[in-house]
Image (cartoon, grey):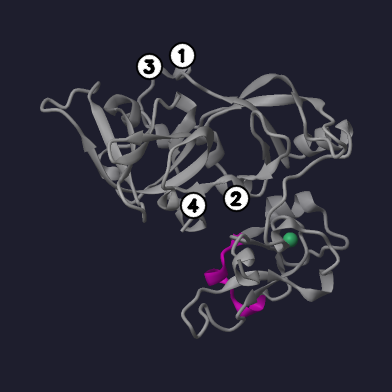
């Protein structure tokens, strides 16, 4: 991977006038800054763009144009002045995050930089049963999980007891831009990793995988099977893939519909936490729990394109 490609992990920069790395409050930057993607850069923003991970200054490269002469899109890069500030968005291979002690990990949770996920919600919450299924617009609250022993200590296998969340993928898709740069601890892991480094595009997936992980894919077609199109019939929702065979989400139509997936969902991005299974000559996600998949709100599509 070239240095150029590692910079493509910086999907947006914070833009805020009259803020600086040395004296600025990070919470002030986070709550007041605009989030600018490389194509939205304008010359007057020079000096007011900051990294979403380390908060030092960024430049857009190239500065004057949205594209390089070879057609590649512009990107954000750290500036030389802060080359000594550690930022994992500068590295080619992202490393998982570990914490010095319980206090440091707990502070990261309190500051909303770290989320311990104990599990994903399996079944639809009871109270939502009677409400109309406008899932996209319905906020999905995450539930507090048990205190969980997590092996994210910096020192040889050390673990801490920390509060966890029972998450839904839909919950992650809300404020998706903010969540991209948070660290998430997933069940059974021994470090925390930024969401942006956990999401894998299904287009290059060519084999089954029985370990659950995060995937995303663009819906290219979707089909409700069966003559009578009963809600309990299967809907096959196909995702863009560059490898041989197809890749789909396979589940009852009523289940997909409750997540906003209908005949009108072509072009949308699906996010999944699950395993990859064989389906005929292709691959699929199936048997997913209620909280294990969601459509990404369209306003965030550009962050994964
Ligand atoms: Zn940075």
Residue 151, percent across and down? 77, 31
Q: Residue at the spot x=54%, y=34% of the render?
A: 171
Q: Residue at the spot x=64%, y=69% of the render?
A: 76
For the residues labelled 4 and 1, the Cα–Cα distance comes to 29 Å
For the residues labelled 4 and 3, the Cα–Cα distance comes to 29 Å
Callout 4–callout 1 Cβ contact below 8 Å: no
Q: Which residues are magenta?
A: 35-44
Task: Give the residue at mark 2.
Answer: 196
- Which is nearer the N-term, disc 4 or disc 3? 3
Res 43 seen here: yes
Mark number, residue 300: 4
Task: Give the residue at mark 3.
Answer: 130
Res 260 seen here: no
For the residues labelled 3 and 2, the Cα–Cα distance comes to 35 Å
- Which is nearer the N-term, disc 4 or disc 2? 2
Q: Give the structural element (helix, strand or loop) at label 3.
A: loop
Q: Is the C-beta of the residue carrying label 1 under 8 Å from the nearest atom of ligand 1?
A: no
Q: Give the structural element (helix, strand or loop) at label 4.
A: helix
Task: Give the residue at mark 1.
Answer: 126
Q: Nearer the viewer, residue 210 or 232?
A: 210
Q: Give the structural element (helix, strand or loop) at label 1.
A: helix
- Which is nearer the N-term, disc 1 or disc 2? 1
Callout 4–callout 3 Cβ contact below 8 Å: no
Does residue 37 belong to the magenta stretch? yes
Question: What is the crowding at mark 2: few (fewer than 14 residues within 10 Å), some, or many (at least 20)?
Answer: many
Q: Give the mark toward the camera: 4 or 3.
A: 4
How many numbered callouts?
4
Check the picture and name the quadrant holding the N terminus. Answer: bottom right
């Amino acid at each position: 991977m070239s240095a150029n490609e590692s910079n493509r992990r910086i999907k947006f920069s914070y833009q805020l006038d009259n803020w600086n790395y040395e004296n600025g409050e990070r919470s002030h930057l986070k709550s007041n800054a605009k989030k600018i993607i490389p194509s939205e850069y304008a010359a007057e923003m020079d000096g007011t763009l900051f990294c979403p991970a380390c908060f030092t200054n960024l430049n857009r490269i190239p500065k004057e144009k949205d594209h390089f002469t070879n057609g590649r899109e512009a990107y954000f890069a750290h500036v030389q002045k802060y080359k000594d500030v550690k930022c994992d968005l500068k590295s080619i291979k992202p490393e998982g995050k570990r914490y010095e002690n319980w206090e440091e990990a707990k502070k990261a949770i309190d500051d909303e930089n770290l989320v311990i996920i104990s599990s994903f919600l399996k079944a639809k919450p009871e109270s939502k049963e009677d409400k109309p299924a406008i899932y996209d617009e319905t906020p999905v609250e995450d539930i507090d999980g048990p205190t969980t022993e997590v092996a994210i200590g910096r020192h040889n296998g050390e673990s801490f007891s920390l509060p966890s969340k029972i998450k839904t993928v839909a919950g992650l898709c809300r404020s998706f831009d903010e969540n991209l740069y948070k660290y998430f601890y997933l069940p059974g892991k021994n470090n925390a990793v930024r969401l942006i480094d956990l999401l894998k595009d299904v287009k290059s997936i060519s084999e089954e995988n029985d370990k659950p992980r995060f995937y995303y894919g663009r819906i290219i077609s979707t089909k409700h099977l069966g003559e009578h199109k009963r809600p309990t019939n299967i809907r096959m929702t196909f995702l863009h893939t560059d490898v041989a065979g197809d890749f789909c989400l396979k589940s009852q139509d009523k289940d997909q519909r409750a997540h906003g997936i209908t005949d009108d969902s072509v072009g949308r991005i699906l996010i999944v936490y699950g395993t990859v299974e064989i389906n005929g000559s292709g691959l699929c996600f199936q048997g997913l729990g209620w909280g294990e998949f969601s459509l990404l709100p369209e306003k965030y599509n550009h962050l994964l394109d």
